[in-house]
Image: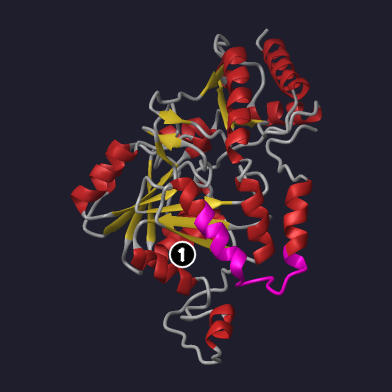
Amino acid sequence: MIPYGKQWIDDDDIQSVVDVLKSDWLTTGPKIDEFEQAVANFTGSTYAVAVSSGTAALHAAMFAINIQSGDEVIVPAMTFAATANCIVFQGGTPVFADVDPYTLLIDTLDVERKINASTKAIISVDYAGQPADYDVLNQIADKNGLVLVADACHAIGGSYKERPVGSLAGLNAFSFHPVKHITTGEGGMITTDNEDFSRRMKIFRNHGITTDHRQRAEQGSWFYEMMELGYNYRITDFQCALGISQLKKLPQWIKRRQKIAKQYDDAYKNNEYIQPLSIASNVKHAYHLYVVRVKFERLGINKDDLFVLLRKNGIGVNVHYIPVYFHPYYQTNFGLKKGLCPVAEEAYNEILSLPIFPKMIDQDIDKVIDMFISIIEKESK
């Protein structure tokens, strides 16, 4: 089985973790600061705050901007549930905007339609690794007094108009899950140029307490104060050591992902049944995912059967995503129904994610291309 995504861990990564396991600090130690500084430097941001997951990163961002009961935050319908859940964690209400049919990025016109007096923020999603239209989104946010948050969990290493992902919004959230570009096992990061946001998130990740264990040890003090209701969203030093090691390889891994995507593009560009997503000319796509739309209405097979058939033949396709408001939780607790975002819903009926990860060899890529096309050709007759 060729999975849709997979980590790449080498001996350097392993040694970096072992070194920390032999050290005095396994958590709240110096590797946290080092990893934060490395990501801040990589993304061109002033501050970076490391946390335990991408979901924790999004939650910390919502805390930093003080989302609370009665507040609305606009999010795209086509995303993972965590993008909306982080708003609910803070008592706010996610408002779902539709997506562009060609890129599946948030539809900026629909964002403007959804803004009202209760709107406090916008969360854009760099779907599949393509940065959203940040000039337009920042203009909308500034004009309406909103905070723009980038869910950049798919896009570290990408850029928009030659500006790196991680520096494009007021807060930018990353995930280091094993299927992402770099991994810390589980882990996340938020980048920002706002010192107050950074300070609030560092307190939030540590139970709302103003100092951590290492800071108190350096001060020779035992005293601490809980100023806010926070969470234990801390990341460990050995995770950060792995992240530091992985980050050094990210540029070459992005190039490999782009090369794989180009091979897919060339294979499918003239296929009447397989439609790759469109890519803007002013972005550097990070290709966390390679998503295609399949025109099932012209085929003798439906999505479920094609999914099973591909996996039976060793192609680990996946689907990203079910529109968030399709989930029973959102339908039950927010009264949301199908029909809310028709473009996202139509896309959901057609999308498949094909395998893409740096360790794929050319034979893997050829197998995906040949198997996908042969099944499609057979089912089109």
Label 1 is placed on what type of residue? Answer: Ala
Asked whether 214 or 315 is in front, the reply is 214
Q: Find residue 297 and report its image quarter.
A: top right
Q: Position of residue 341 (x, y in %)?
A: 40, 39
Q: Position of residue 39 (x, y in %)?
A: 51, 52
Residue 281 can be seen, yes or no: yes
Q: Position of residue 101 (x, y in %)?
A: 42, 28
Residue 273 can be seen, yes or no: no
* Residue drawn at (35%, 65%) of the image: 195
Q: Is residue 369 left or right of residue 346?
A: right
Residue on which disc 1 sits: 60
Q: Is residue 34 magenta?
A: yes
On the rendered image, what quadrant is the N terminus found in? top right
Tell me where the magenta segment starts and ends, as one range.
20-38
On the rendered image, what quadrant is the C terminus found in? top right
* Residue drawn at (73%, 70%) of the image: 23
- Label 1 packing within 10 angstroms: few (<14), some (14-19), many (20+): many
Q: Is residue 240 above or below residue 8?
A: below
Q: Is residue 186 left or right of residue 330?
A: right
Q: Is residue 276 above or below residue 228?
A: above
